[in-house]
Image: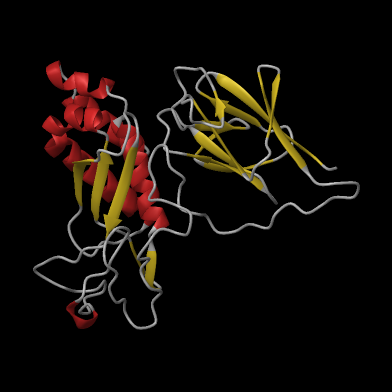
Amino acid sequence: MGVMKRFEQRLEGLVNGTFAKVFKSEVQPVEIAGALQRECDNNATIWNRDRTVVPNDFIVELSAPDFERLSPYSGQLGDELAGMVRDYAKQQRYTFMGPIKVNLEKADDLDTGLYRVRSRTLASSSSQQAPGGAPAPGGQRPGGYGYPPAAAPAGAPPMPSAPPPGARPGGYGYPQPAAPQRPAAGPAPGGRARYWIEINGTRHQISRPTLVLGRSTEADVRIDDPGVSRRHCEIRTGTPSTIQDLGSTNGIVVDGQHTTRATLRDGSRIVVGSTTVIYRQAEG
């Protein structure tokens, strides 16, 4: 059983009576869970051959209305989200510098349904040690997004101290941290490669390197389907083109396979909710 499915099942055990109403808010806990997974992936740092360290201290910033709905249950929800991060790290073979904490905070600059995730790698106060038992250099604590950076072990890549240029920490309604650059599709004989998708017979041209599909009006292509999340998935054009799930509730199915990320080819069939999207590309 997948990490996200186990998380959803644990939540079902908490949802009863008044607590059930919290899950009708604009921000859904499963979306936050997906954002925490991406935060781990985007900030994973290799310390040595056997150790990849990820953040263990997370702050989820919510709009005032969503914070008011979720804050009475922040303790329970934080524990469940921390457990989900722990399960995901075990699956990915990530390690932590200290205990996992997930806290909710109000952000007055966010509208309902929007959130941000900040994270840092925080060493345990009882033992300022790096993975493998070695003391952290100079007693410093590795930093993370939104926090001061600190030294890493000799020979290890430095921890990121700020989001990539032009990006903000991940969360619904904001660009995800930049992915490694892929070779762009070069001009083919007679012209450049063209990309588009077809939904219910309607063609949507892909004129930018990325295209977000979702139920929100802020998505590049809006899909009016209750089974589709506000920011459901993202298509990246290139060589090859790919599709990435953005922590949606129901996931994506590409060419008959349920997945979180897949390579696309001309004619690939993408299912989101109950909607089928056909990916198309052509030379020239």
Front residue of 32/63: it is 63
Whether residue 3 is visible to the viewer of this picture, yes or no, is no
Against 282, residue 166 (above or below) is: below
Residue that sits furthest to the right in the current view = 190
Place of residue 32 in the rendered image (x, y in percent of width and height, measured from the top left): 32, 38
- Which colour style is shown? secondary structure
Total numbered circles:
0
Horizontal relation, residue 14 to residue 111: left or right: left
Place of residue 66 in the rendered image (x, y in percent of width and height, measured from the top left): 24, 29
Front residue of 216/7: it is 216
Whether residue 264 is visible to the viewer of this picture, yes or no, is yes
Residue that sits furthest to the front in the current view = 109
Place of residue 30 in the rendered image (x, y in percent of width and height, measured from the top left): 33, 33
Residue that appears at 46% across and 26% down = 216
Horizontal relation, residue 262 to residue 142: left or right: right
Place of residue 135 in the rendered image (x, y in percent of width and height, measured from the top left): 20, 79
Question: Looking at the figure, which quarter contains the N terminus?
Answer: top left
Question: Looking at the figure, which quarter contains the C terminus?
Answer: top right
Front residue of 276/205: it is 205
Against 126, residue 110 (above or below) is: above
Q: Quadrant of residue 54?
A: bottom left
Against 281, residue 272 (above or below) is: above
Q: Quadrant of residue 44?
A: bottom left
